[in-house]
Amino acid sequence: DVHKYIYRPGTSIPVGALYLGDTPRTRFFDEHGPDARLYRSLEAAFGGDAVFITSSTRDGRQLMVEAWSGRNPGDFYIFDNEAKKADHVISRSSWI
C-alpha cells in the first residue's frame, strides 16, 4: 500500500509514491523523468537510505529531505537542488 504520495518539488503535481515494507521503496509514473532521477541521486548520496522530500520552496531550489534506514531513525537535511549540497538540520533520537 502507498504510504505517501510524492509531489514534484514546489508544486502539488503527483509524480510517484513511497511504499513501506521490509525495505521502503519509491515508484514513479515516469521512472526516467527528472523527479525519479532526483530521488535516485539522493538515495545514492545518502548511502542507500530511504529518502523523502518532506517540503520545498516554490521554485524547487531548496528541499527538506528526510533520510532513514533500519539503523537510523531519521535525519533531516536542507538540500540545495542547484548546488547539489545537503546541510544537516536535525536527527531523530535513536531511543524513539
Image (cartoon, grey):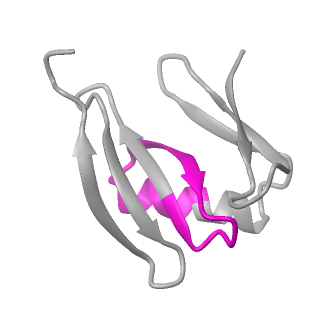
Q: Magenta segment: does it hold 48?
A: yes
Front residue (pair 64, 15): 64
Farthest-out residue, front: 58
Determine if the magenta segment contains residue 74: no
Q: Position of residue 86 (x, y in %)?
A: 35, 67
| Label total for image | 0
Identify which residue is drawn at 39% across, 61% down: 78
Percent of width and height locating residue 48: 39, 48
Horizontal side of residue 24 vs 18, given as left or right? left
Judge whether 49 appears above or below 63 on screen. above
Residue 64 x/y as whole percent? 47, 54
Please determine whether, in this image, residue 11 is positioned above or below residue 73.
below
Residue 28 lies, in percent from the top left, at 77, 46
User: The N terminus appears in which quarter of the rendering?
Assistant: top right
* In the image, farthest residue toward the bottom: 83
Going by the image, does 71 lie left or right of 32?
left
| Relative to 59, residue 57 above or below | above
Viewport quadrant of the C terminus: top left
The residue positioned 47% from the left and 17% from the top of the image is: 22
Residue at 71% x, 61% y: name it: 10
Looking at this view, is 55 or 53 the one in front? 55
Q: Which residues are magenta?
A: 39-63
Residue 61 location, quadrant:
bottom right
Residue 8, located in which quarter of the rendered image?
A: bottom right
Q: Is residue 84 above or below residue 93?
A: below
Please tell me in which quadrant of the rendered image residue 91 appears: top left
